[in-house]
């Protein structure tokens, strides 16, 4: 076992070699998004100090911000007590306030269930998605 990567062996990867990763804004505690990581994504995140995820739909690494310019500076990496969920404490870069969601919102968790049982947008679009992505 490579001692430099022993920490990666302590993560409880699922059968596809993935682990869910939560991006939390360091300054506010806001949960920005949830994505997936494989070993390479987590190792690159540590090396770059920027979030790198694994896109299940594209089956490749996804450096957050590579298309939008909305990078996530990683301040801290944690794992939960079961070692099967990663928490990244980040600063969302590229727009003020930070945009983490592909819809142009601060957080991917912008839909709220109202008393009538309907999901409604609780947070505004900060920047139109068609002006964000190349």
Image (cartoon, helix red, strand yellow):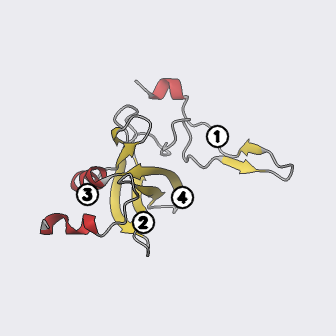
Dot 2, how many residues are within 10 Å of its Cα: few (below 14), some (14-19), or many (20+)?
Answer: some
Q: Provide the secondary structure element on which disc 2 rests.
A: loop
Q: CA separation, marks 3 and 4? A: 21 Å
* Residue indicated by mark 2: 84
Query: Mark 3 — residue?
Result: 46
**In the image: residue 39, left or right of residue 22:** left
Check disc 4 and report its element: helix, strand or loop.
loop
Closer to the chain start, of discs 2 and 3, is 3
Query: Residue 2 vs residue 41: left or right?
Result: left
The residue drawn where x is 37% and y is 45% is: 54
Sequence-wise, the earlier of marks 1 and 2 is 2
**Mark identifier at residue 30:** 4
Mark 1, secondary structure of its residue: loop
Q: Give the residue number, with chain letter if any, for mark 1.
A: 124
Horizontal and vertical percent position of residue 53: 36, 47
Residue 116 placement, left or right of 34: right
As drawn, 79 above or below 16: below
Depth order, front residue of 123/120: 120
Q: Earlier in the sequence, mark 3 or mark 4?
A: 4
Quadrant of the frame with the C terminus:
top left
Disc number placed over residue 51 in the picture, else none:
none
> Label 1 to label 2, Cα distance in Å?
32 Å
Label located before the other in sequence (1 or 3): 3
Give SS at disc 3. helix
Callout 1 touching callout 4 (CB < 8 Å)? no
Q: Nearer the viewer, mark 3 or mark 4?
A: 3
C-alpha separation, residue under disc 2 versus residue under disc 3: 17 Å
**Tag nearer the camera, 1 or 2:** 2
Q: Please, is residue 57 above or below residue 28 in the view?
A: above
Nearer-N-terminus badge (4/2): 4
């Amino acid at each position: 076992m490579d001692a430099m990567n022993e920490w990666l062996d302590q993560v409880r990867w699922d059968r596809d070699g993935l682990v869910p990763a939560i991006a939390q804004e360091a300054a506010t505690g806001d949960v920005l998004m949830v994505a997936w990581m494989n070993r390479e994504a987590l190792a690159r995140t540590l090396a770059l100090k920027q979030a790198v995820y694994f896109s299940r739909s594209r089956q490749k690494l996804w450096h957050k911000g590579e298309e939008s310019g909305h990078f996530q500076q990683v301040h801290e990496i944690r794992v939960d007590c079961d070692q099967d969920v990663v928490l990244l404490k980040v600063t969302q870069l590229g727009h003020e306030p930070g945009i983490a969601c592909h819809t142009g919102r601060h957080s991917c968790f912008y839909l709220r269930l109202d008393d009538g049982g309907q999901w409604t947008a609780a947070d505004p679009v900060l920047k139109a998605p068609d002006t964000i992505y190349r």
